[in-house]
């Protein structure tokens, strides 16, 4: 549940790369979709939590450029320095929605007081989650009997498990050292373990070990790590028009970024406190999701690109490793009506 919990590094140079985005002038194109039928100002603001992951930066653009209001959404964004804290707040009913991964949505679903329902996919990790190994390890087979440091039950553990299964191996073939991701990277860097599963900036720290290298990454497993917006079942039941307006805002924000790439990158780099050149190095590992990508992700299928299938795999994995006692009712955590409505109106 500590997927991207970077509290301890919030003042560090690399961690600043995962702070929020701000941007320039408003776009006249506010996107398609079904317009809300009730005034956004008629109700209290919908509070959405988000934290430091590239796929969630664009929400700050929506706030800065007035795109929520332009699409009829009455939203208050709440920034969390720690990802885990945002999930806990959402599960406790302190937020109306939160940005989180699919596996974490499954983890918290059973205990969330108002329910948790995925309504739009922001991105897929496309290389930003990695397994880093020592110089003598050149294949999955070479990991047999080796010690791997990672956070059990979360995404990099799941990524490694997929890779092992694909190579007719299992987690029983390796020695897992269960550590928080920052501690896992530190253990690898200091020579205490043979490999580490990590997301940025931790895999960069791991690569500082002499001879270390990337064995595999999420780029090789499309769909394994979807980052998304989940909202409460209560919000969907009581204000579906506002949920639609929020989804419409997301795609309007992507349109703004596409129309203003240079300015968007410049302001994101300024917000992150790094040069444009350094900022570019951290963009490639995240694949932003278009409406077509969303429609595919929500559809039924037999690959990890299809969330109904991926959710089943993730739920079974977390039960098998003892991360959750039992899987939730997966039919209740995915709702594609809002992306479909946007697609039909666009």
Image (cartoon, helix red, strand yellow):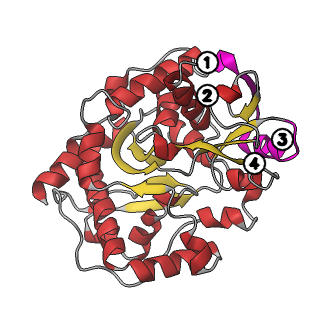
Q: Can residue 122 be seen in this view?
A: yes
Residue 211 image position (x, y, % from top left): 78, 50
Q: Residue 29 is drawn in which quadrant?
A: bottom left
Residue named by callout 2? 153
Q: Residue at x 19, y 57 (%)?
A: 36
Residue named by callout 3? 187
Residue named by callout 4? 212
The numbered mark, 2 or 4, whose residue comes first in the sequence reads 2
The numbered mark, 3 or 4, whose residue comes first in the sequence reads 3
Residue 169 image position (x, y, % from top left): 58, 19
Q: How far apart are marks 3 and 4 (CA)?
A: 13 Å
Q: In this view, does 56 lie to the left or right of 245?
A: right
Disc 4, SS: loop
- Residue 21 is one of the magenta-drawn residues: no
Query: Are the residues at dot 2 and dot 3 in contact (C-beta closer than 8 Å)?
Result: no
Magenta range is 170-192
The N terminus sits in image quarter: top right
- Above or below for 193 versus 217: above
């Amino acid at each position: 549940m500590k997927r991207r919990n970077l509290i301890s590094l919030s003042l560090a140079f690399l961690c600043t790369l995962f702070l929020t985005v701000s941007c320039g002038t408003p776009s006249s194109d506010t996107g398609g979709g079904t317009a809300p039928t009730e005034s956004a100002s008629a109700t209290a603001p919908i509070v959405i939590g988000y934290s430091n992951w590239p796929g969630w930066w664009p929400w700050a653009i929506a706030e800065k450029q007035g795109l929520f209001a332009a699409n009829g959404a009455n939203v208050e964004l709440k920034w969390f320095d720690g990802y885990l804290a945002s999930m806990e707040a959402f599960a406790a009913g302190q937020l109306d929605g939160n940005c989180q991964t699919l596996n974490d949505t499954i983890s918290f679903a059973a205990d969330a007081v108002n329910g948790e329902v995925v309504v739009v996919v922001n991105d897929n990790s496309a290389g930003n989650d990695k397994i880093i190994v020592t110089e003598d390890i050149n294949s999955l087979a070479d990991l047999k009997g080796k010690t791997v440091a990672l956070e059990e039950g979360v995404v990099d553990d799941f990524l490694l498990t997929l890779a092992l299964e694909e190579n007719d191996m299992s987690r029983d073939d390796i020695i897992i050292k269960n550590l928080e991701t920052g501690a896992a990277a530190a253990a690898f860097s200091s020579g205490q373990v043979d490999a580490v599963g990590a997301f940025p900036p931790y895999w960069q720290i791991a690569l500082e070990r002499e001879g270390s290298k990337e064995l595999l990454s999420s780029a090789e497993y499309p769909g394994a790590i979807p980052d998304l917006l989940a909202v409460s079942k209560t919000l969907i039941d009581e204000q579906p028009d506002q949920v639609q307006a929020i989804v419409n805002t997301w795609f309007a924000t992507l349109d703004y970024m596409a129309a203003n790439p240079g300015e968007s990158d410049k302001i994101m780099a300024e917000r992150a406190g790094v040069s444009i050149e350094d900022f570019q190095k951290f963009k490639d590992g995240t694949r932003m999701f278009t409406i077509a990508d969303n429609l595919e992700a929500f559809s039924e299928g037999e690959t990890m690109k299809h969330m109904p299938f991926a959710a089943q795999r993730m739920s079974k994995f977390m039960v098998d490793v003892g991360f959750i006692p039992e899987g939730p009712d997966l039919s209740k955590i995915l709702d594609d009506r809002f992306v479909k409505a946007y697609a039909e109106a666009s």
